[in-house]
Image (cartoon, coloured by chain):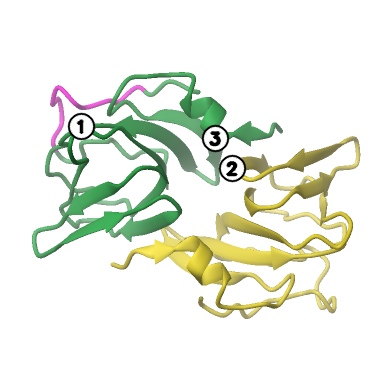
Chain colours: A green, B yellow
Amino acid sequence: MKVVNVKEKLASFSEHWDPRIAGTLNGQMVKLAKIKGDFIWHSHENEDELFWVIKGTLHLDFRDKSVSLKEGEFIIVPKGVEHRPWTADGEEVHIMLFEPASTINTGEIEGHELTRSELKEV
Amino acid sequence: MKVVNVKEKLASFSEHWDPRIAGTLNGQMVKLAKIKGDFIWHSHENEDELFWVIKGTLHLDFRDKSVSLKEGEFIIVPKGVEHRPWTADGEEVHIMLFEPASTINTGEIEGHELTRSELKEV
């Protein structure tokens, strides 16, 4: 058992769109990520996904609307719902993800250059 | 799908040791709680439990050590591990919990005056 300082963990890596594993519990993972620019449209067939903003503003497009989340806000994207995360104006945004350990970042879009299927611990 | 502002949700209730449901995903729940003073020793037979500090300092006693968590820090308490959360000097501390929907706050200590088995949504 260890105490995890989220901002210290985020300061320990710099890659964008490359989530790191910060904790595992009940078959779920806590992941930390730095993101910047546009991600791709995708969905997760079997996994709900929680986005929690640690720093900056996260934009999420859905097929029927868009939302923006500030620091201290979260949203749960249900399985099967297409979404596209992005950040505006070159802003680097820090987020925490809660999701099943099986979740792949690009969902059903396998083998994309942004796909990260083997995550590092942080 | 809705954007949840954690601090606004915490401002909407005042009871201590009475977790509120802020989100549900993959059979897990995101809970928000205000705590103050001493909780009881307990463990969760089948559920790992994540404590994330939103405001203040959370103290957690284990049988072999104690830890303190500040804002922006979290810890995962594995199933079966006895723990006792408390806060010092009358401080009200705000926390987020991530755990299976089945988790009862007092664990194996059923029917205690602090037991909350029917949680409200926030």
Lower position in the chain sequence, tag 3 or tag 1: 3
- Residue drawn at the location 38% of the way across and 24% of the way down: A119
Amino acid identity at mark 2: Gly
Q: Nearer the viewer, residue A113 or B59?
A: B59
Query: A107 or A54: nearer the eye?
Result: A54
The mark found on residue A6 in the picture is 3
Labelled pair 2, 3 in contact (Cβ < 8 Å): yes
Viewed as shown, does residue B4 lie left or right of B82? left
Q: Position of residue A7 (x, y in %)?
A: 53, 32
Is residue B56 rendered to the left or right of residue A30? right
User: Could you classify mark 1 by the number of other residues whose Cα lies within 10 Å: few (under 14), some (14-19), or many (20 or more)?
Assistant: few
Disc 1 on helix, strand or loop?
A: loop
* Picture disc at residue B72: 2
Numbered label attached to residue A90: 1
The residue at 46%/30% (across/down) is A21
Pointer 2 indicates a residue of which chain?
B
Crowdedness of circle 2 by 10 Å Cα count: few (<14), some, many (20+)? some
Indicate yes or no whether the magenta region holds residue B48.
no
Q: Amino acid at mark 3?
A: Val
Task: From the image, state whether disc 3 or disc 1 is nearer to you.
Answer: 1
Report the label total. Answer: 3
Chain at tag 1 = A
- Crowd class of label 3 (few under 14; some 14 to 19; many from 20; radius 10 Å): some
User: Does residue A115 show up magenta in the picture?
Assistant: yes
Marks 2/3 same chain: no
- Range covered by the magenta-colored residues: A109-118
The picture places residue B67, in percent across and down from the top left corner, at: 80, 38
Residue furthest left in the image: A63
Say which amino acid is labelled 1: Gly
Does residue A55 show up? yes
